[in-house]
Amino acid sequence: MPLEPESLGAALNEPLTLHSTLCRREAGAFQQALSSGDDVVVACTQESRLFQEIAAQTEGAAAVPIRFVNIRETGGWSRDAAQASPKIAALLAVAHLPAPEPVATVSYQSAGRVLIIGALDAAEQAAALLADTLDVTLFSLGAGENGGAQERRYPVLTGKLDRLTGWLGAFELNWTQHNAIDLDLCTRCNACLDACPEGAIGFDYQVNNALCKSHRACVKACGVAGAIDFSRAPQAQTETFDLVLDLRSTPAFTQHALPQGYFSVGSSAPGRTDLMKAVVRLRGLVGEFEKPRFFTYKQKLCAHTRNTQVGCTACIDVCSASAVRSDIKGQQIVVNPSLCVGCGTCTTVCPSGALTYAYPRANEQGVALKTLLSTYARAGGKNAAVLLHSLEGGVRLIGDLGRAARVDSATRGVPARVLPLALHHSASLGVDLWLSAVAYGASQVWVLLTDEDAPQYRDALQTQMDVAQAILSGLGYSGTHLRLLHARDARDLATLDADLQATPAQGVAHPGSFAVQADKRATLELALDHLIAQAPQKPVTIALPARGSPLGALTINKDACTLCLSCINACPSAALQDNPLEPQLKFIEKNCVQCGLCVKTCPEKALALLPQLNLGAQRKEAVVLNAMQPYVCIRCSKPFGTLKGIESMLGKLAGHAMFQGAAADRLKMCGDCRVIDIHSAENEVKITDIR
C-alpha cells in the first residue's frame, strides 16, 4: 500500500511522519501523540480495539478524542492504489474535522419487564433463556405442540390480543380476557382436563368454547382453587412492558424499522440463530438509554396541510418506522422521536425544509463534503465521485470489496477517484447537498443502499435523483451525475465492483466557495446559482419530473379564476401574494415548493403545478399571474372585490328567494354601505309602524 508522507502532508498543510507498524512495534508513538493532548486520528480501523486499550492504559489520555478512518480497504487495497494519495489525503482531512455539535437526546428507561407472545410451550422455552436477567410475562396463544409445563414459573396472560403499541420502556398491551379459566388462579393440577368429557380443555389451560357442551364437570373438579367461572363477563385489560419478544409468524408491527425493544423471530425453535440473537439483545436492554433527537421540525414551513386541505405527504409516505403521522386538527405533521430511527429520509424528501436532519446538521455535512472535495483537488485528484454509504452495512460492504481486491485479481476494488463518505444513514442527504457536492467539484454523487434499507427509500431517493439529474442535464453538464447503487452483501461484490468503474461525468470548471446553510431551500439556491453560473448551456427553462420536484411554477386559467385569493392563505411558502392596492395575484417562483395546496384549495380549479427551473431573473421576483378590474360600490363608488367575482356571485344567487330586490342591491355594496343600508331600512320600517 503506497503511502507518500510528503504529498499527504502538503495536501493537509502539515508535516507528516509515517508509522507503518504503529499498532505493534510503534505503539509508543501512539502514546506519545496522546500525551500531546491534541485530537488523534488513527488511519486504521482493524486494530481500533487495541488502540483504545492502549489509550486506556496511557496516563492522561482519557480525555483525548480518538477517531479512526479506514484508508486501507477504501483506497490502499485497490488496483488504483498507486494513484490513491489524493483520496487518502481527503479521507484524513475529513477525519480531522471536529465531532458534530451535540443535540437534544431521547431517553428510554427499561426495568427489564419483558412480554413473550406465542404458543405456551415455545414461550416457556424462550422465557427460560431470559428469566435469570429479566422479569418475564407470557401471553399464551394456545398450548403448542408440547403444551405448557406443569410447574407454573411465569405469569401467563391469555385472551384476544387487541393491540400492542409503544417502544422500549413503554409498550402497552391491550387484550380482552374472555375465557372461563383464570390463569392467575389455575394451579395446573390437570383435574379439569380429566373431568371434561369433550376434551375441550387443553394444556394451555383454556376452555375451547366450540367443543364445550356445558356439562360444567370442570367447575366441580376445580374445587377450592375456583379458577373456572363460566359466568365471568369478558374484561378489557391493559398492561405495560419494557420489552417484547414476539414468536408469532405475523408480527404485531409491520413497518420495516421495528420499535426499539421489540423483537420478532417468527418460529421459535430452540437454538435458532435469530432467536438467540434476540435473547442476547434483550438481556442487554435493562437500564437507561439515550439516542440523539435526529430531526428538527418547523411547522411554519410545513406544506402538509392548510385549512383542512392536505398537500404534501412525502415524509409520512416514506417513513419506515411509522414515526410520522398527520395531525389534521393541528394543521401539521407529528413526529414521534421515540420511534424515529434516524434514517433522515423524511428530511431528504421534504420540499420546504420544514423537517431537517439534526445530527449531524446540514452545515456540518456541508463542511465534510467541501473538505473532502477541496483536499482531493488540492492533492491533484481528478473527477471525484462521492460515494455516500451507511455506517453499518455500507462500511461492511466497502471493507469486503477492499479485502477481495487484495486477494482476487478479478476484483478492482474502490477506484482512486471514488471518495467514500460514511453517514449515519445513506438516505439522510438529498437534492440540496447532492447538488452542493457537484458545485464543490464532484463529478458524480452515488448513494449505496443495502438490504438494511427500507424498500421505499430506493423509490424516494430515485425520485429526488431524477430531479437533480434533470437540472444538471438541462444545464448542459454531460454524463450521469447521480446514481443509486444497491448491494445486499458479499454476494453482490462483483456488481458493486463493476458499478464503481463508471465513466466520469462533466463537472464544474471552478468549485464553489459557498457554505451549506441550515435552511434547505437556501442551500439549494446557492448550489443552483453556482451551477447556473458555470453551466455549459443556459436555456430559459428546464422541465423537471412531475413527481417529487421541489421547484416549479404555476399555470392559471384566467377565465376560471375569480381572484378570490383563497390560494394565498393556503400557500405555506409565501410564493403567492396579493396587491393591497388593486386586485392582483402575484407569484414568486423561487419560493414555490410544488406542494399543491393552492391547487386543492382553489374553488374554481383554476391552478395547476408546472415543475420546472426558470433560469431567468424573474424567477426571484414577484410576477403578476392574474389581474382584474375592481367592482365599484353602487352607493359610495368605493372599489371592493373584483368585477368577475361579484358578477359570478350575483349570477349564482339570482334565483335565491333571500336575495331579491333591495337584498340583491346590497350584494353590490361594500361592507360599510351594506350595514348602513340595512339600518336605514330598519328605521323606515319603524317609522311606518308608528304612523
Image (cartoon, rainbow, N blue to C red):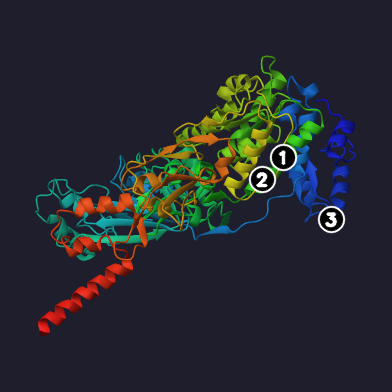
Question: What amino acid is labelled 1 in the image?
Answer: Lys
Crowd band around label 1 with a 10 angstrom C-alpha radius: few (<14), some (14–19), many (20+): many
Q: Position of residue 605 (x, y in %)?
A: 32, 43
Circles 1 and 3: CB distance less than 8 Å? no
- Label 2 vs 3, first from the N-terminus: 3
Whether 339 is drawn above or below 19: the answer is below
Quadrant in the picture for the C terminus: bottom left
Question: What amino acid is labelled 2 in the image?
Answer: Val
- Quarter-of-image position of residue 192: bottom left
Secondary structure of the residue carrying numbered label 2: loop
The residue that disc 1 covers is 370
Whether 647 is drawn above or below 541: the answer is below
Q: Say whether residue 679 is left or right of residue 274.
A: left
- Label 1 vs 3, first from the N-terminus: 3
Separation of marks 2 and 3 at Cα, in angstroms: 40 Å
Whether 65 is drawn above or below 594: the answer is below
**Which residue is outermost to the top?**
410
The residue that disc 2 covers is 516
Q: Is residue 320 something that shows in the picture?
A: no
Quadrant in the picture for the N terminus: top right
Whether 689 is drawn above or below 150: the answer is below
Residue at screen point 51% across, 36% down: 453
Residue 59 numbered tag? 3
Secondary structure of the residue carrying numbered label 1: helix
Residue 47 numbered tag? none
- Label 2 vs 1, first from the N-terminus: 1
